[in-house]
Image: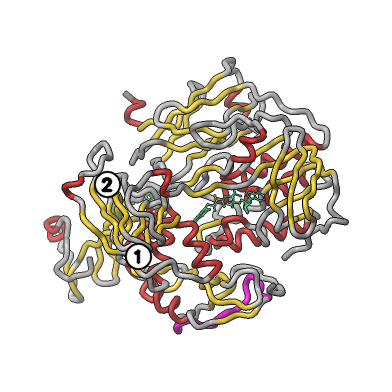
Amino acid sequence: MTDRTATRDDGSDRADRGDRDDRGEVETHVYLCTGCPLGCRLEVDAVDDDVLEVRGFACRRGERYGRQEHVDPRRPVATTVWIEGAVDRRAPVRTAEPVPRDLVRDVVASLRGVRLEAPVRRGDLVVADVCDTGIDVIVTRDLERIGRP
Amino acid sequence: MPITPDRRHLQSRYDVVIVGAGPAGMAAALGARERGAEHVLLVDRETDPGGILLQCIHSGFGLHAFGEEVTGPEYAGRFLEQVLEQDVDVLTDAYVMDVTADRRVKLMSPRVGVHTVDAATVVLAMGARERTREAIRIPGDRPSGVMTAGFAQQLVNLEGYLPGRRAVILGSGDIGLIMARRLALEGVEVVGVFELLPQPSGLTRNVVQCLDDLDIPLHLSTTVIRIHGRDRVERVTVAPVDDDRRPIPEKAWDVDCDTLLLSIGLIPDAELARSLGAQLDPLTGGPVVSGTMETTLPGVFAAGNVVHVNDLADWVSREAQVAGEAAGALATGARRPDQDIRLIPGENVAYVVPHTIASDGTHTLSFRVRRPIHGPTVLRLGEIHRRKVRAVVPAEMVTMKVSPRILEGFRGDVLRVDAIAAEEVAR
Ligand SMILES: Cc1cc2nc3c(=O)[nH]c(=O)nc-3n(C[C@H](O)[C@H](O)[C@H](O)COP(=O)(O)OP(=O)(O)OC[C@H]3O[C@@H](n4cnc5c(N)ncnc54)[C@H](O)[C@@H]3O)c2cc1C
Ligand code: SF4
């Protein structure tokens, strides 16, 4: 719900509180909290990236999540790359930190041509500063060198 | 590959032999060593220990075990390091063919041939298998391109093949959701996920991060009623279901695809336990176990997905640690604690593990609810203990700690476990 004229579940309430601001209008965005099985439906009131209020959480974790999800949603990325000389043909890798959600596809795509050579160790660097995020991609499994039959 | 004993080093007698080197087997090995078992053998049919975790490349493991989230291979790697430090004999590429009630373990491997080892105690940790098309009987042609989601995961993440170009996923369990994202990120068009139930079976987190993030549609209360295609899948017919989960054919529609992934659940791989003669629980499909995870056969323990299907590897490790400790203790001469209280599933509880507990022991009960309760819920152990939780859903296993203090003064021999909405309890 990022459309400027998009859903405002309770516009009157907000008008009462005079939520106007020279930068823009207050909008309510809805996110599902992923913190626990309750899956609270969070409503985040914000003017662009300025979060005014988070509602609908049953615990503090939800409030923090709602804020983060609105301002800078991030995801851990895990994928695999080719490896030569190991028991399996693919080696699992991940980003050392979560990356901006909108870059997930680019990160996976940029790793498509990568080929590793066994042995590799957990934590070995695969690509530094992937997609200019400042975040590295590392190996997540020890893979020994084996003679292929 | 870690150092494995060859025929010369492989002993003919072990204190504890563990079948399966997934998270359950590795934690059991550590538990057994902690309780003084000298000679512990961990056997797996794959080349690398780790079990299913090696193909679960995504993050989401270890929050409880390590206090941080890591991927499946990292979780397995950390445990393997400890196992090797503890001088456990790890034998891989070795298939366990048979275990007898007097605990002779017959295995076969290219490295040692067919070999029998005697064990003072055995821990079964063979994990689970995926349910297939046969389990739900989808009618239609039998073309290629129909496979379980876990098999597709193995193809993509270990072997580097894509299962097809345009995929439909039946079932919204976590494996299905994870594979929807995995395939979409690898360039496969994921047409949609179809779920029979009115709510997703997987975690909210996976619904958001695997489907919503990638604009993959989730169709609830909808199922696949027919598969079409001569050699390869060409399309499937899907239909919404009524309140009794019966498809409504008048509202059916066709979806073009070349691949159908089934994510319709796991069942304990309890074949060895069955042929051994251990009693099985029809509710879990796994063996009946005591509070120390011992099956009905003395000296034969079981832990992990072979007992009941877990959603978190962390719970598997914890439960298997208990099994390993008890197996190690028994192998080195400790007495077996009486397990005199029987647990039975009550209101809104599908099953409870373990099946019996000791009144003077500390236990963690694991169970699953039948129906979601989206609000404060009371977990009740007979009349003697209550715990309140925020909500319960079938997708997430529920755990409850029981201590001697709670059981003190209880004189009966059966306790019922219930999960009830708090407002109903109040009434
Ligand atoms: C797709 C997917 C996603 C998951 N996501 C998560 C997650 O995000 N977070 C989380 O915590 N958990 C997750 N899980 C659950 C977790 O991975 C499992 O609960 C856990 O791996 C079960 O451990 P196990 O040791 O019981 O079984 P397994 O890992 O299956 O290990 C069993 C081992 O036994 C071996 N074996 C079986 N039979 C024999 C035999 N006869 N002889 C020799 N060896 C044998 C097998 O080769 C295997 O290595 C996921 C599972 C799957 C499938
Ligand atoms: S807000 Fe708290 S209770 Fe609600 S889903 Fe998030 S973590 Fe769970």
The amino acid type found where label 1 is placed reads: Asp
Under 8 Å from ligand 1: the CB of mark 1? no
Between residue A80 and residue A73, name the one nearer to us: A80
Please tell me the numbered disc located at residue B258. 1
At 50% from the left and 25% from the top, the residue drawn is: B344
Q: Position of residue B264 (x, y in %)?
A: 41, 48
Name the element at disc 2.
loop
> Which percent across, then down, holds residue B103?
76, 37
Left or right, residue A9 beside residue B19: left
Q: Quadrant of residue B332?
A: top right
Viewport quadrant of the N terminus of chain B:
bottom right
Q: Position of residue B185 (x, y in %)?
A: 40, 71
State how far apart marks 2 and 1 are (Cα): 23 Å
Say what amino acid the circle numbered 2 marks. Answer: Ser
Q: Is residue A54 visible?
A: no
| Residue B86 image-quadrant placement | bottom right
Q: Hey, which residue is sitting farthest front in the picture? A: B230
Disc sitting over residue B321 in the figure: none
- Would you name the residue on which mark 2 appears? B221
